[in-house]
Amino acid sequence: MELKQFLIMIRKKLILIITIPILVSIIVAIGSVLLIPPVYEASSTLYIITQNAVSEDELTYNELLKNQQLVKDYRELIKSKTIAKTVLDELKITDITPDELSKKITVNSKNDTRVLDIRVKDTDPVRSMQLANKICEVFVKKAINITKIDNISVVDSAEIPKTPVEPQPLLNTLLAFLISFFATVGSFYLYEILNETIKTSEDIGTYLELNVLGTIPTFDIK
């Protein structure tokens, strides 16, 4: 399909090309607000103290590597089933499993430092705070038992989140509009490509490989 034909197709289907994405966006916006439950995220912060308790200036390259590896180990330990099960038992939460809780936990190292940012998502803002704080509490105890080193300190305790992080109606609506817009244009384009109906004299040469001897013009006689 040539550019001119494509633009003609766009002009003919312009109303549908605009209407369909708008309708899809409205449906997605309503669904995001009414059907998807809000999800809240609470965060707490831990700091891993240098094992040999030396100053930052005295840290050697090997010690830095050990600390970085220790941070990675702790990140995996925080999301372990052992930690999740203990947290759920102590909070007496029975409607989610340890596996489900592990998937709700996100652990990040801030700018490759020894500061760990622990985030927990839940549909209940209060419970998300309780889970984040209890995870820190249980992890500190478990880490001491496992590594035999008391080198973890809680920097910031989690607070009750005020606004949900999911869903994001505005973002979902924008994405729905863009995706449906390109899908609509693509569908019409594909239809025109596959449609071999003779519409113009040029189509006769294209599809039937015949020469056009003449055309009969149409007249609007009143």
Image (cartoon, rainbow, N blue to C red):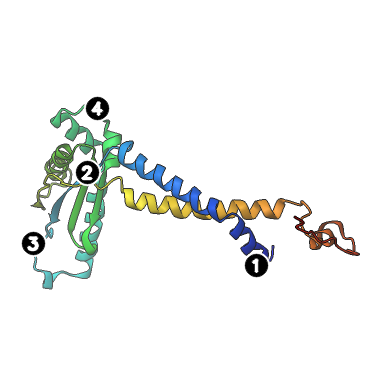
Within 10 Å of disc 4 (Cα), the crowding (few <14, some 14-19, many 20+) is few
Mark pair 2, 4: CA separation: 17 Å
Which sits earlier in the primary sequence, circle 1 or circle 3? 1
Mark pair 1, 4: CA separation: 58 Å
Q: Nearer the viewer, residue 38 or 45?
A: 38
SS class, disc 2: strand
x and y, in percent, of residue 150 in the image: 9, 50
Within 10 Å of disc 1 (Cα), the crowding (few <14, some 14-19, many 20+) is few
x and y, in percent, of residue 178 in the image: 46, 55
Which quarter of the rendering shows the N terminus? bottom right
Q: Which residue is mark 1?
A: 3
Q: In the image, is residue 136 above or below residue 204?
A: above
Mark pair 1, 2: CA separation: 48 Å
* Three-letter amino acid code at the position of disc 1: Leu
Please name which of the two marks, 1 or 2, marks the residue nearer to the observer.
Answer: 1
Which sits earlier in the primary sequence, circle 2 or circle 4? 2
Q: Which residue is mark 2?
A: 40
Which sits earlier in the primary sequence, circle 1 or circle 2? 1
Residue 53: mark: 3
Mark pair 3, 2: CA separation: 37 Å
Q: Which residue is mark 4?
A: 95
Residue depicted at 50% across the width and 48% down the height: 20
